[in-house]
Image: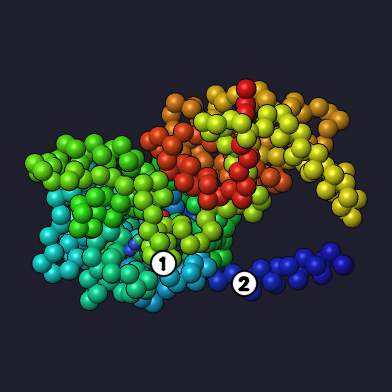
C-alpha cells in the first residue's frame, strides 16, 4: 500500500510537470538529397516526420528537437518572438544569452541581413568553403527582421547553415529560419544522440527527430569577422578548426603591401575583452557550461614544468581513499557497503589506462572506462566527448576524470569544453 501511494504520488507529480507527451520520430538522413536548395526525400517516414515537425514549429509555434552535424538542437521560429521565447523557458536559459539562427539557403541568409549590406570578402570565402557546416558567423542585426529576444539586445546576430540533411530539410520545409541552441537543460553537456535529449527533455518538448549520432559531436565554431582591424575573432572554437580558417584566408584574402596582415585570434588564448566578458556574448563565458551532475576532474598531463605534478598513482590513491572514507562515514548502511564507480575518459592509446589499479574482487572501487579515440585523431575524441560525459553520468559514477589533450586542431574545442565542465584541475605525471 505504502509503495503504491509513493508511486501514485510520483506519477502525479511527473505528469503534472510534463507539458507534452514527447514523441520520438526516426529520420533517415541518407534519404534526403540536397543537391539543390530544395530537399528531395525518398523515404516516406522521414518525409512525414519532417512535415510533422514543421507543423509543430509553424502552426503551433512549438519548439522541436532535431539533429545537426554538431549536436542536437532545440529549434523554434527565429523571427517570431513568442516562439523563440519557448526555447528559453524549455532550457531554463538566461534571457541575456543570444541564440544562433539557422538557415537552409543563401537566399534565406540574405533575407535576414540589413538592406544594402554587402557580405565581406572574408565571409564570402569562409561561406564558400564551410557552409553548409559547423561554422557560425556574426552579422550586423537587421532590427526590423530579427527580434531582440534572439540577440539578447546585441547589435549582431549569429547565423549558420547546418550541413545535417535533417536540419537543413526541416528549415527548408518550414520555410523559415530556426533559432536553435543545443537541446539540453542550460549548463549540461550538449546532446549528441536522441536518447541524450529524451533523458533530459522528456515531457518538455512535443517532438524529437532522431537522425542518429551527430557527426562532429561538439558545437559549431563561432566567428566574429566584423571588426575594423580585419582580424577574425574565434569566440568559441568548434567544428571548423582555427588551422582550417587560417588556411582558407591565406588562400583567398591577399594582404596589401604595407598593410597589417590579418590574423585569426582565439578568445582567451590570443586576446581578452573585459567588456565582452561582462556581457554573455562570448559563448560560455558568463554561465556554467557542459557540467554533468557529478564532479569532473581534469587531469593535466601536458604542462612543460612537471615540478608541481603528482604521480598519477598517488593521486588515484588519495582519491579512492577519500571516496571510501566519505562513504563509510555515510549514515546509510547501503551506501557504506555498495561499490563506488569512478568514470575515466582518456584517449584510447593513453598511458593512463595502464596506470589504473585493477579492480580486485574485494575492492569497492569500480573503474568505468570510456576510451575517447586515438591521440593522433582529435576529431574522433571530439565526437565521443559529450557522449562519454553523458553515458558515465547515466551509469551513476561518483566522479569523472578526464585526461588533457593537446590543443591542436579539434583539440582546441575539446579542451575549451573540458575546462568548462571540470570543477577541478590536478596536474599529474603518467610516467
Ligand atoms: O553547433 C551549434 O552551434 C549548436 C547547433 C544546435 O547548431 N548550437 C549551439 O547553440 O551551440 P548554443 O546556444 O548552445 O550556443 C550558441 C553560442 C552561445 O553561447 C551564445 O552566447 C553565442 O553562441 N552567440 C549567439 N549569438 C551571439 C552574438 N550575437 N554574439 C556573440 N555570441 C553569440
Ligand atoms: Mg549550448
Residue 230 drawn at (x, y percent): 20, 52
Sequence-earlier tag: 1 or 2: 2
Mark 1 to mark 2: distance in Å? Answer: 32 Å
Question: In the image, what residue occupies the spot 52% across and 68% down?
Answer: 92
Q: Mark 1 highlights which residue?
A: 279
121 lies left or right of 169: left
In the rendered image, the vertical position of residue 103 relative to residue 314, given as above or below: below
- Give x and y (percent) for residue 272: 39, 54
Q: Residues within 10 Å of mark 2 (few under 14, many from 20)?
A: few
- 421 with respect to 247 (left or right): right
Query: Most extreme residue toward the left, as rendered?
Result: 257
Instruction: Decide if residue 342 is on the left or right side of residue 41.
Output: right
Give the quarter of the figure containing the N terminus: bottom right
Left or right of 141 on screen, residue 181: right
At 34% across and 73% down in the image, what residue appears?
153
Q: Residue 113's spot in the image, x, y percent? A: 19, 65
Q: Residues within 10 Å of mark 1 (few under 14, many from 20)?
A: some
Front-lying residue, 53 or 104:
104
The residue closer to the viewer here, 375 or 75, is: 375
Q: Is residue 383 visible?
A: no
Give the residue at mark 2. Answer: 17
Q: Position of residue 345 (x, y in %)?
A: 59, 36
Check the image and report above or below for 415 versus 3: above
Mark 1 vs ligand 1: CB below 8 Å = no
Residue at position x 15%, y 54% from top?
120
Secondary structure under badge 2?
Answer: helix
**The C terminus sits in image quarter:** top right
Q: Quadrant of residue 257?
A: top left
- Nearest the viewer among 375 and 4 is 375
Amino acid at each position: 500500500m505504502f509503495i503504491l501511494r509513493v508511486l501514485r504520488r510520483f506519477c502525479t507529480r511527473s505528469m503534472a510537470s510534463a507539458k507534452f507527451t514527447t514523441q520520438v520520430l526516426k529520420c533517415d538522413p541518407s534519404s534526403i538529397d540536397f543537391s539543390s536548395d530544395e530537399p528531395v526525400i525518398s523515404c516516406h517516414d522521414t518525409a512525414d516526420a519532417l512535415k510533422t515537425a514543421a507543423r509543430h514549429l509553424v502552426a503551433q509555434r512549438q519548439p522541436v528537437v532535431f539533429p545537426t552535424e554538431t549536436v542536437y538542437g532545440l529549434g523554434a521560429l527565429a523571427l517570431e518572438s513568442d516562439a523563440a521565447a519557448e526555447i528559453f523557458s524549455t532550457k531554463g536559459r538566461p534571457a541575456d544569452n543570444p541564440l544562433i539562427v539557422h538557415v537552409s539557403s543563401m537566399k534565406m541568409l540574405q533575407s535576414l541581413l540589413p538592406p544594402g549590406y554587402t557580405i565581406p570578402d572574408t565571409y564570402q570565402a569562409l561561406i564558400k568553403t564551410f557552409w553548409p557546416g559547423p561554422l557560425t558567423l556574426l552579422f550586423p542585426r537587421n532590427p526590423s527582421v530579427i527580434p531582440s529576444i534572439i540577440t539578447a539586445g546585441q547589435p549582431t546576430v549569429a547565423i549558420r547553415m547546418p550541413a545535417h540533411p535533417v536540419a537543413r530539410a526541416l528549415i527548408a520545409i518550414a520555410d523559415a529560419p530556426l533559432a536553435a541552441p543545443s537541446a539540453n537543460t542550460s549548463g549540461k553537456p550538449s546532446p549528441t544522440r536522441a536518447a541524450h535529449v529524451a533523458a533530459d527533455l522528456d515531457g518538455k518538448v512535443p517532438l524529437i527527430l532522431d537522425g542518429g549520432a551527430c557527426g562532429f559531436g561538439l558545437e559549431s565554431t563561432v566567428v566574429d569577422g566584423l571588426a575594423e582591424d580585419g582580424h577574425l575573432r574565434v569566440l568559441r572554437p568548434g567544428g571548423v578548426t582555427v588551422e582550417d580558417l587560417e588556411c582558407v584566408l591565406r588562400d583567398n584574402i591577399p594582404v596589401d603591401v604595407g598593410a597589417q596582415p590579418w590574423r585569426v585570434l582565439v578568445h582567451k588564448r590570443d586576446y581578452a575583452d573585459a567588456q565582452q566578458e561582462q556581457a554573455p556574448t562570448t559563448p560560455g563565458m558568463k554561465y556554467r557550461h557542459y557540467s554533468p551532475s557529478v564532479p569532473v576532474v581534469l587531469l593535466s598531463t601536458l604542462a612543460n614544468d612537471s615540478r608541481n605534478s603528482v604521480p598519477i598513482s598517488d593521486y588515484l590513491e588519495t582519491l579512492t581513499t577519500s571516496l571510501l572514507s566519505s562513504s563509510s562515514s555515510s549514515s546509510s548502511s547501503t551506501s557504506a557497503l555498495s561499490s563506488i564507480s569512478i568514470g575515466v575518459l582518456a584517449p584510447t592509446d593513453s598511458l593512463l589506462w595502464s596506470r589504473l589499479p585493477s579492480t580486485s574482487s574485494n575492492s569497492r572501487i569500480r573503474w568505468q572506462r570510456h576510451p575517447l579515440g586515438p591521440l593522433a585523431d582529435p576529431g574522433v575524441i571530439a565526437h565521443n566527448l559529450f557522449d562519454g560525459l553523458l553515458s558515465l553520468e547515466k551509469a551513476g559514477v561518483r566522479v569523472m576524470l578526464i585526461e588533457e589533450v593537446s590543443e591542436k586542431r579539434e583539440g582546441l574545442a575539446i579542451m575549451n569544453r573540458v575546462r568548462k565542465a571540470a570543477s577541478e584541475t590536478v596536474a599529474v605525471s603518467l610516467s
